[in-house]
Amino acid sequence: MRISSDRRGDDFEINVIPLIDVLLTLLMFFVLTTTFVQHSRLQVNLPQASAVDRDMQPPALTVMVDREGHFYVGSDEVAGTSVAELKQAIARVAGDDRSRQVTIRADALSTHQSVVNAMDALGQLGFTHLAIATTPDRSGETP
């Protein structure tokens, strides 16, 4: 009989295969017992309302500036990069409504001069409600 002072520790191991089996069984149970609503089978009679014009504001006019300095009014590209060409495109889209909200969406890498040109064209046409679109800061820090 051999007696030794160094004892080997038993290697304990947690067997997670039964846990995975139980979780998959629960997942299958919930997936198979969930009721899915199918809207195509519903027959709905919508209520009627008067067709009187409502006091709704038109959607905001969007002027976009890409990183090369090209302008877009709505989804249409402006032929050139000058203020006069931009003014013509804005006037064509906006018509006579100068109280309309205008959103300037400029690429972060576009030149400052391009954004100023867009603001200058809008100001010369008489637009006063300007907004510059931004994205929220992802760092989560508040100044």
Image: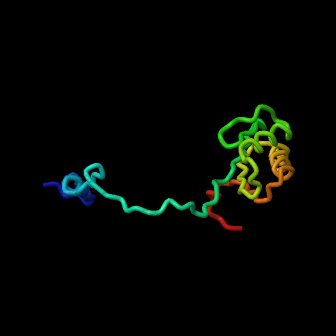
The residue positioned 68% from the left and 54% from the top of the image is 134
In the figure, 136 relative to 105: above or below? Answer: below
Residue 99, horizontal then vertical, whole percent: 75, 58
In the figure, 123 relative to 74: above or below? Answer: below
Relative to residue 77, is residue 20 drawn left or right?
left
Q: Nearer the viewer, residue 65 or 49?
A: 49
Residue 17, horizontal then vertical, whole percent: 21, 51
Q: Quadrant of residue 86?
A: top right
**In which quadrant of the rendered image does the N terminus lie?**
bottom left
Count the labels in the image.
0
Relative to residue 131, is residue 24 drawn left or right?
left
Q: Quadrant of residue 72?
A: top right
Residue 6, horizontal then vertical, whole percent: 27, 58
Residue 143, horizontal then vertical, whole percent: 71, 68
Residue situated furthest bottom in the rendering: 143
The residue positioned 65% from the left and 39% from the top of the image is 75
Figure coloring: rainbow
Q: Nearer the viewer, residue 20 or 93?
A: 93
The residue positioned 81% from the left and 46% from the top of the image is 118
Relative to residue 86, is residue 41 drawn left or right?
left
Q: Nearer the viewer, residue 21 or 66?
A: 66
The residue positioned 84% from the left and 47% from the top of the image is 121
Residue situated furthest left in the rendering: 1
